Image (cartoon, coloured by chain):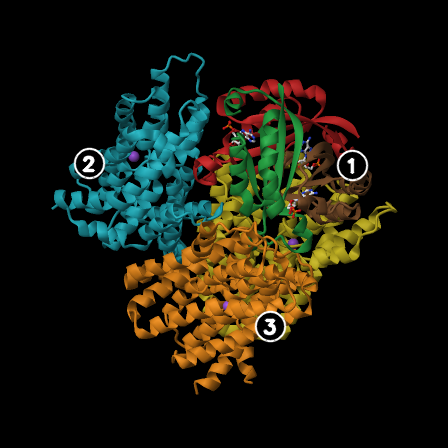
Chain colours: A red, B cyan, C orange, D green, E yellow, F brown
């Protein structure tokens, strides 16, 4: 087990490809994406998911601590422009053969 | 005005189910059409209307009427966002004004489809190439809107990724599926029509009905957003469609469209986009407030058009074409 | 008893696909109908049956028979949960007893629809207003159940948010869509019927078949829950429907319902809710154990009714109406 | 980057509006909701998602540390009554223009 | 070769919509058919084709032709993965070779269905029991593939959970639903057919069209994976179907199948699985690279078969059966 | 409030039942499952969710710290064989009547 960083981003679905590009550019190639996430807007009338393209995606990416700075630099401008939030936390990775490969 | 047109329009299943959807939200029923069912319905409707239009286009061929109609459509799609922009600038900033102008310059396929069902009810013919007009009028307003933003803001950092914008404008899923189905309809003609008929024709009215139930839910949920939009925008969202439809009718009369086509053309001019354009605007003009352009198009203009607008424009046609 | 009725019922596609679904779970096939497809089907079935009922109600008008039938329906919906509650109290605590009583006092729309398909098979007519009876019988049991909880518990903190409860009982999506479609059917009448017919009629049997495939999956997955429910509840889930159907038939005979309506009425009395009431109970009586009321209704009573019950009650009618 | 709290709640979907109300009352206006979450019951026969209203929702809300107490006080009674779980952890927020506004 | 067969095949709505889907990906349109809609369509197609086959099987009865055909199907399903394995071993390791061999030994139901629509177009009959052949040919290749892995690797830890493997091979959702619907079709016969006809027949062509639109999207998205697969595999994915179809035609001629059945049989031999087998391989041979067996089957063999293969094999039949 | 461990596993959906079995065997009976999670493959053509069975599931399970060792021992071989990732982090549980029961 060793320490890695967990990046979670919630943003509008139209930003998805841009955000994944940024992650890739920062060397973070693994990620998981959950679609159809309703948001704060749920209570303010913006939840008409695929009708009006106003649904969110929830992106999780685990990365090495030293990759973090690059990610933040690349993702922050996107979120500033188009909206969305990004949070970082610490997690322990259970090393598995595959994971070593993907990091 | 001939109120019987409105009444006979309202007493159709699609419109009544639209009301049912709105009622569900108002009385807080938990009725909902879960995603992605509405998406399925809208893909189906685009496929079916495009395919049918294509099949009919093969029959009629590309005549002078076709060319004139498509020309008129393109012009209206470019001109409407221009003058609505200046009206909107009276009260709003450039970003919001351009985004709303683009929304109203574009069209709503469901409004068009509802109007075509209305014509079928009244046994009035319309031509397959009106579907091509529908496809043509979806995208130009996006480009016009962005040009307006570029001209009227001094934000030097702004530089649109134009290739991305054109991509989004002309290859978004609705335009793409509509045009694709139209071409396939043209290629397969009568033969293709026969094999697909139980699917694309038999189910059409029923799917439209079901879809309008969902549109009622969606529109009603947006109504509370209207508090933030203010009286100016709400009046705009009712008056501009009437003005646009009027101009549309004048042009239609001028180039001698038959009555059915004239109705569809005026409905195209009158309707506002609540899917393609809002999506494009969120990406390209993030400064504009989405709840302004989505809510007015969805919670005011859309219901107005399908309930009052369509029979009203028909009434105008009855007067003018007499 | 005339076994041929059971056999001819079982040899219908919907029932056979129900078995297929159950088999899939038993042999551990990975067959599944992914959400929200079953939801789409159930919305469709409610819309179609409601709409058809409304269209037919317009034809028949509101006669004395209609009033008597709806009265009988309302009475059964209130009385059934009362006496089943006391039977259940013999073995269960108040919360569980009330929740199960409410479940069995209410109805299952799919059982009703399956019975109507069974009648259509046998070429026996039934009246459109039976759909109104269906709608009427869904909600009262929820209210009766909550009143029972209030009377028989001394939990002083309990205070139902009655407005929320009534909301949930009378405006939940199934009741709302059913009643709404019924009203729209009445408003549009024969004309609306014709345009929607390929959708609401042509597809009906097929969608029912597909939906019962899913119900088979869902019911079979619940079977292992029955270990926890015990012999008492399982016997209850088979015997009470027979008793309720019997009472229903007696009333139907008494007020002279035609045979088709009598079957549907007895099926309404015999069936138990596995959607609306469980949802309401989870919210209002969280103390009750959901796996008790969901599993008995879904894994015992529902299969029993559609496989054995419907032909059995029909057999009773054949005897009584002779 | 600064420290905020991550609240994650898993509960039955019928509780959703009540929980969001509680969050709002506690001053936490941002949230993301993932629907159709299967639960522990997955293995015990309670997963028939929208058939029987027994599906769960997964609610994530990021809030300032000092808002936490209010949230816990408001949400706990709901979970006690209707079931569901709530967990809190620490995350770093990547400040973006929009985020500042939403906090 | 008679190019008119290819052209008339290509000018059908299903094939054209397949191209439309591929185009959407190539021009980067955001068109997508959201999950689980494609799943719904594929369940529908399996149900409809199985049910129809069953109904027709009842009419024809189990004759010598039926037995011979099913025997031939089983033999091809076992032999094809064997010899393709040794061809593949020339360039690939045992795991990948076995997985790809299993993929090509199994079948693609959608290719079969497209071929049956092609026959309907040409007014050529085919027998209901070909659906039974379809069902029979799905699973054996999985078993053969695993046996090959066992024989050709020395990995002593490997021990398949055979019960799980057989489960997955013979009870996976496609085989299960197909066989189940076939049996139900046999049980309900002509009567069941009539009630389900608007659903299982009327909609069939339309749903196939819509589904192929999605298949076009899916296949095109896989095309870029082909860079990794290399020239050897791509040639394999085009040549092996032709070889297999040829062998299939020879057998069909030998046992005197009628032309329609012969086409379907050759298409079964030529097609490769991209759902059931890949799923089974991921579970049982995780060492094999999924993008190899999924991409070749989906992005090369599937489009090749439905566009060129079907008319090509038909052309062969025209020559041989003359 | 007291400390528990958050296990999050992302894996192919066909592993789901095996992973839940492992969790159960390790004494962790509570979990939540989110389906239809697109993965790293999203950008490499492996996202054709239910078409080709290549979609992922996201499994969250909260457990007592002392259960962790058992989970890791049971889940790691699965992930090694079939792919997938597993991460552990610390969270505070908001005790509710139901939760006590489920732990
Ligand atoms: N404090 C928060 N906690 C959880 N989710 C949030 C929060 N703030 C924003 N979000 C999510 O991020 C999306 C975009 O946020 P915003 O850019 O603030 O509109 C919202 O729709 C929410 O789904
Ligand atoms: N220990 C746990 N870890 C993850 N999810 C849990 C846990 N316990 C409960 N849940 C989720 O919370 C839902 C409601 O929990 P409960 O109130 O205990 O029935 C369950 O259906 C699970 O989805
Ligand atoms: N670094 C990562 N961050 C987030 N998700 C990941 C990461 N690596 C892998 N995944 C997810 O886990 C799935 C299986 O991973 P793998 O076994 O590496 O193919 C991928 O499809 C991703 O959804
Ligand atoms: Na317009
Ligand atoms: Na009842
Ligand atoms: Na094959």
The residue to which callout 2 is attached is B246
Q: Quadrant of residue B202?
A: bottom left
Q: Which mark is residue C238?
A: 3
Q: Position of residue E9 (x, y in %)?
A: 47, 52
Q: Are marks 2 and 1 on the same chain?
A: no
Local crowd size for mark 3, using a 10 Å CA cut-off: few (<14), some (14–19), many (≥20)? many
| Pointer 2 chain | B
Residue B239 visible in the picture:
yes
The residue to which callout 1 is attached is F65
Q: Position of residue C252 (x, y in %)?
A: 42, 78
Q: Which mark is residue A92?
A: none
Q: Position of residue C100 (x, y in %)?
A: 57, 63
Distance of mark 3 from mark 2, alpha carbons?
A: 66 Å
Relative to B211, E303 lies left or right: right
Q: Residue at x 77, y 34 (%)?
A: A94
Residue E314 visible in the picture:
no
Local crowd size for mark 2, using a 10 Å CA cut-off: few (<14), some (14–19), many (≥20)? some
| Pointer 3 chain | C
- Most extreme residue toward the bottom is C322
Front-most of residues C125 and E251: C125
Q: Nearer the viewer, mark 2 or mark 1?
A: 1
């Amino acid at each position: 087990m060793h320490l890695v960083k967990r990046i979670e981003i919630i943003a509008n679905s139209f930003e998805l490809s841009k955000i994944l590009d940024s992650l890739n550019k920062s060397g973070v190639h693994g990620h998981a994406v959950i679609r159809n996430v309703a948001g704060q807007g749920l209570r303010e009338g913006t939840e008409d998911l695929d009708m009006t393209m106003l649904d969110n995606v929830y992106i999780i990416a685990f990365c090495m601590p030293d990759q973090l700075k690059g990610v933040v630099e690349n993702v922050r401008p996107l979120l500033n422009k188009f909206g969305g939030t990004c949070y970082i936390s610490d997690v322990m990775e259970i090393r598995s053969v595959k994971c070593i490969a993907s990091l | 005005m001939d109120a019987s047109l409105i009444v006979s329009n309202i007493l159709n299943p699609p419109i009544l189910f639209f009301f049912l959807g709105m009622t569900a939200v108002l009385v807080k029923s938990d009725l909902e059409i879960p995603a992605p069912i509405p998406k399925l319905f809208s893909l189906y409707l685009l496929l079916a209307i495009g395919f049918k239009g294509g099949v009919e286009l093969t029959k009629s061929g590309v005549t002078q009427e076709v060319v004139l109609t498509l020309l008129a459509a393109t012009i209206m799609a470019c001109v409407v966002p221009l003058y609505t922009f200046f009206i909107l600038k009276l009260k709003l900033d450039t970003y919001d004004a351009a985004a709303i102008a683009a929304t109203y310059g574009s069209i709503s396929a469901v409004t068009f489809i509802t109007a075509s069902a209305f014509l079928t009810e009244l046994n009035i013919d319309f031509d397959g190439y009106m579907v091509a007009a529908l496809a043509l009028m979806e995208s130009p307003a996006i480009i016009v809107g962005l040009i307006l933003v570029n001209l009227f803001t001094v934000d030097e950092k702004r530089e649109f990724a134009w290739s991305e914008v054109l991509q989004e404008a002309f290859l978004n899923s609705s335009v793409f599926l509509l045009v694709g189905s139209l071409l396939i309809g043209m290629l397969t003609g009568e033969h293709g029509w026969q094999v697909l008929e139980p699917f694309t024709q038999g189910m059409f009215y029923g799917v439209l009905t079901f879809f309008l139930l969902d549109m009622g839910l969606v529109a009603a949920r947006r109504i509370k957003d209207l508090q933030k939009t203010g009286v100016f925008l709400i009046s705009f969202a009712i008056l501009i469609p009437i003005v646009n439809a009027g101009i549309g009718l004048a042009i239609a009369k001028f180039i001698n469209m038959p009555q059915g086509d004239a109705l569809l053309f005026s409905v195209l001019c009158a309707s506002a986009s609540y899917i393609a354009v809002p999506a494009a605007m969120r990406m390209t003009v993030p400064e504009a407030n989405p709840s302004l352009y989505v809510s007015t198009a969805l919670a005011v203009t859309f219901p107005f058009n399908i309930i009052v607008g369509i029979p009203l424009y028909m009434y105008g046609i009855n007067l003018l074409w007499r």
